[in-house]
Amino acid sequence: MSIENALVRSTVRVMAGKNGQEPFSVGTGFYYKVQDPKTSNAKIFILTNKHVVNGADYIRFVHSYADSLEDLDEHHQPVGRVDKTEQLPIAPFVYNHPNADIDLCAIDVTIILAPILNSGKKLRSMVLDSSWMVKDEDKKHVRDIEQVLVVGYPRGIWDHHNNMPISRIGNTATHPFANYQDKQDFLIDVAAFQGSSGSPVFSYEAPMFRQASGAYTPGTKVNLIGVVWGVIESSVEGDLKVIEIPSALKHVPVMNASLNLALALHADVIKDLDALILPTIK
């Protein structure tokens, strides 16, 4: 599977709701693994924004698996693919980022995915981990303007027949490791809408990528650099406002103009969740 195909398959459409009721919220999540380096034991999570699941009792999502990921049909899907809808209570399985100002949480879905993996089936989704982030020694080579790939479900749109997300290409609008307005955010020049919350942001160079020396070499270079959580809008009066991306499923009248600028958390804040989760892995 190409790296592009794998990246697109890292996300999951997250719906959230109250017990006994239909979901009221939709957003994007992505699969993420935390592994104990001493024992190799691991847990798998869906990472998303806190505001996507705020006030909800459960999440609902669809995951796909098959006997093999190599044997593809004419729609570029694994032959015999199974799509399964799951509903999971949030409270026993959620880890909120310890900083209240950082809109990020992890929901443990190991109880759902482990039986599938242990049975020998192949999860169609790629599971990310901290190794996808830019290493500290490489950050000095990252430029203010980098091409980015954003994967998610803007306005909740998805290819439900194939259980696939929407992918968009853009670029960074501020340096991806600088704190925009003294917060752990940066800006990307990619339109974000209701449902985009929680979308992973990847730096993406292809079919050539730049080495530390400045020379270019054939190939693809990808890193996880952020998680979308908000947008900058211009009000009818011309004021600029930073807002959380709405996740409500109901249609909301649009009164403000989008500047096609989204805010993304630095991917490094995910490591704070790693530290929170690691002691729980037995």
Image (spheres, helix red, strand yellow):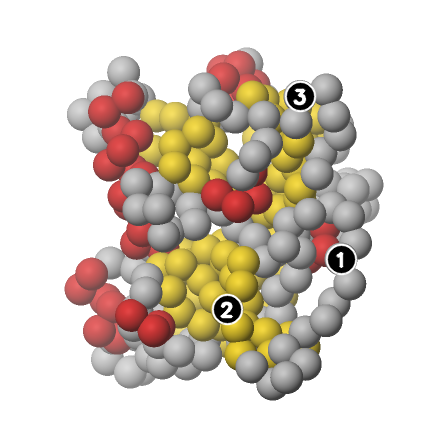
**Amino acid carrying mark 2 in the image:** Val
Q: Measured from the top left, where is residue 199 in percent x and y?
A: 54, 53
Tell me: 200 left or right of 191.
left
Q: Work out whether 42 lies above or below 27.
A: above
Asked if labels 1 and 3 touch by Cβ distance under 8 angstroms, the answer is: no
Residue for badge 1? 252
For label 3, count other residues whose C-alpha is less than 10 Å away and answer few (under 14), some (14-19) or many (20+). few
Identify whether 40 is placed above or below 144. Answer: above
Q: Earlier in the sequence, mark 3 or mark 1?
A: 3
For marks 2 and 1 on the same chain, the one whose residue lies earlier in the sequence? 2
* Residue on which the image places disc 2: 242
Q: Position of residue 167 (x, y in %)?
A: 64, 60
Distance from disc 2 to disc 3, alpha carbons, whole Å, reads 31 Å
Q: Three-letter amino acid code at disc 3?
A: Asn
**CA gap, disc 3 to disc 1?**
24 Å
Indicate whether 96 appears above or below 10: above
What residue appears at the point 56 percent right and 21 percent down from the top-left corner?
89
Label 3 element class? loop
- Report whether 39 appears left or right of 109: left
User: Residue at label 3?
Assistant: 19
Residue at point 25% right, 68% down? Answer: 139
Residue 39 position, x and y percent, is: 23, 21
Q: Quadrant of the C terminus?
A: top left
Q: Report the front residue among 125 and 23.
A: 23
Q: Amino acid at mark 1?
A: Val
Measure how far apart labels 2 and 1 are at the Cα level: 17 Å
